[in-house]
Amino acid sequence: MRELKKQLQQKIISPCYLFYGTETYLKTRYTQLLKKVLLEPSAETMNMDIFEGNKQAISTILDSTETLPFLSDKRFVIVKESGLFQAGRKNDSEKMADYLQKIPDTTCILFLETEVDKRGKMYKAVVKNGYVAEMNGLSEKELLYWITRECKKNKFEIETKVASYLLHIVGGEMVQLEAEIKKLSGFLPENAQATTYDIDIICTKSLETKIFDLVNAVASGKPKEAITIYRNLLLMKESPLMVLAMIIRQFRMILQCKILSEQGEPQIAQKIGIRDFMVREYLKQAKYFSVNELKQSLEYCLQTDVDIKTGKQNSELAIELLILRYGKKE
């Protein structure tokens, strides 16, 4: 992405772009940078079209790309989650891929996708005729640097260990991190040093962090605390089935991390697609369980899910019983 940023700063513009991946913040940020280079603010209304979803007719998109810009050098067409980069729209994908070889000099097309098939004709067409950037989550090191920089921009300081705590509490989504940093900025005096206490009283925990706390309370023999966390989630209108799905994911991640750790795998985070700080936290929880206990926990959770969905158990009560079953008495 450094190369992309450098090109945009130098106003080197490709006819078409593909930004894909899971990190919404990065896709939004680079979309804004591209728009800033292409269009004056006063020209946006007349020279920018946004198409979203896989139901958009290709003919409508192409009509927009063929329209000459009005009082501007460029026209900017944004196509979001089109489905053109995956199986299912073969004819449309081929038609658009062919078109990318002859885009008018007056038009720039940006595709924003979560998932793409790199073997597909559309992906290859953008690689050949434009610029492709994968925008997934940053590494832990990159995120900590970014958090420090964002805090400075918001006129307060944060140490690396406190930034790491913020990352644990809020999670790794940059959009949410940005929002929580702004909340801290509104609370802290200018040039103040943020503390973990400030984060605890100001920042909103991610659902993943709350589930982590719930499982941690169960594992460390604090079922009353786990039940309290669970009931608070219900008060916040979280679905019992969503909570159960997150608990299942948590146990699965703990199990994977434990097995890989015991096998001596040095790159656990990369192997299962999570960040390093989460691996450390999962391995802490793994100490409370044997591999067999984790497998049994997963089986019981999955059976509870089946029982709820088939009407054998009430959802709220079933999950409370699950928590009590695996929480040792205090």
Image: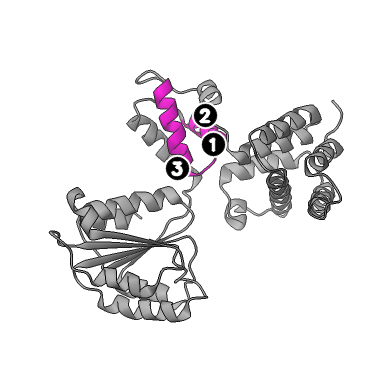
> In the rendered view, would you say 33 is above or below 207?
below
Residue 182 image point, x, y percent: 41, 31
First in sequence: mark 3 vs mark 2:
3
Identify the residue at image location x=78%, y=51%.
305
Front position in the image: 13 or 192: 13
Secondary structure mostly taken by the magenta-highlighted segment of the chain? helix
Range shown magenta? 160-187
Specify the farthest residue to the top: 189
First in sequence: mark 1 vs mark 3:
1
Q: Residues within 10 Å of mark 1 (few under 14, many from 20)?
A: many
Residue 196 image point, x, y percent: 53, 24
Snapshot quadrant of residue 152: top left
Task: State the quadrant of the C terminus.
Answer: top right
Q: Secondary structure at mark 1?
A: helix
First in sequence: mark 2 vs mark 1:
1
- Magenta-colored stretch includes residue 164: yes
Q: Secondary structure at mark 3?
A: helix
Residue position for label 2: 203
The answer to whether residue 165 is seen in the rendering is: yes
Residue position for label 3: 175
Identify residue type, mark 1: Val
Snapshot quadrant of residue 154: top left
Residue position for label 1: 170
Q: Secondary structure at mark 2?
A: loop
